[in-house]
Image (tube, rainbow, N blue to C red):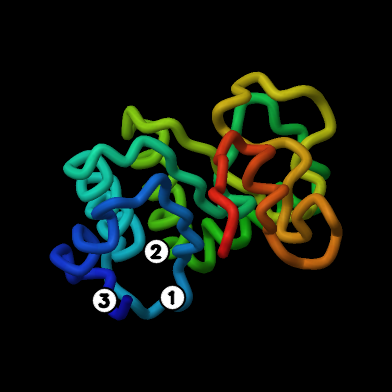
Amino acid sequence: MAGELTDATAIKTAAHDADAALSVLGPSSTRVPGTPITNAMVTVISAMKAHGVRRLVASATLSLSDPGDAPPWTVRAMVTGVRLFAPRPYLDIVGTGEAIKGSGLEWRLVPQPGGRRQGGLTDPGLYAEGLSAGGTNGEGVINATSLSNLGLVLPPVG
């Protein structure tokens, strides 16, 4: 299905008859004004609720944090750099996370690799432990097995 982030009708149509939503939305430019990714996620969440879709899995950058995080200093420095030198994308991704956390949906955020966890999770709903951009098989994909580990049961194909 084709559509733009600002096309609420296309987003609502996409949510119709869905069992769950998978989002890999993320900022791509420091020149885009406002918070288009956050706004799009709010539209996605609204469309999901309108159609009774309860489960959302979304990618998460290192800028989203959890009380259980214990990232190395290099990750903290990188996030600080993003916050200082790319404030709009930083605010957009943090706003997206806040929209998801406050959505009332069953949600999981899949973190990028990079050593964000060195201890246990304090909020098991925030991040899917053991899942990264490499999935559970290390092949650089999030596959059906990875998604099933998040509580998404996918019907067989064919």
Identified at 32% across, 53% down, the residue is 41
Q: Earlier in the sequence, mark 3 or mark 2?
A: 3
Q: Residues within 10 Å of mark 3 (few under 14, many from 20)?
A: few
Residue at the front extreme?
A: 158
Identified at 62% across, 60% down, the residue is 81
Q: Which corner quadrant of the image does residue 39 belong to?
A: bottom left
Instruction: Describe the element under mark 3 as helix, strand or loop.
Output: loop
Q: Which residue is mark 2?
A: 88
Q: Earlier in the sequence, mark 1 or mark 3?
A: 3
- Rendered location of residue 134, percent (x, y): 78, 60
> Label 3 to label 2, Cα distance in Å?
20 Å
Instruction: Describe the element under mark 2 as helix, strand or loop.
Output: helix
Q: Is 39 placed left or right of 63 in the picture?
A: left
What amino acid is found at the position of numbered circle 3 in the picture? Glu
Q: Earlier in the sequence, mark 2 or mark 1?
A: 1
Residue at the top extreme?
A: 122
Q: Residues within 10 Å of mark 2 (few under 14, many from 20)?
A: many
Q: Is 37 placed left or right of 75 in the picture?
A: left
What amino acid is found at the position of numbered circle 2 in the picture? Arg
Task: Tell me if label 2 and label 1 are in contact, CB under 8 Å.
Answer: yes
Q: Is 37 situated above or below 150? A: below
Q: Which residue is mark 3?
A: 4
- Rendered location of residue 9, percent (x, y): 14, 65
Identified at 28% across, 53% down, the residue is 44
What amino acid is found at the position of numbered circle 1 in the picture? Thr
Per the rendering, the mark at residue 30 is 1
Q: Is 156 situated above or below 32? A: above
Q: Nearer the viewer, residue 85 or 14?
A: 14
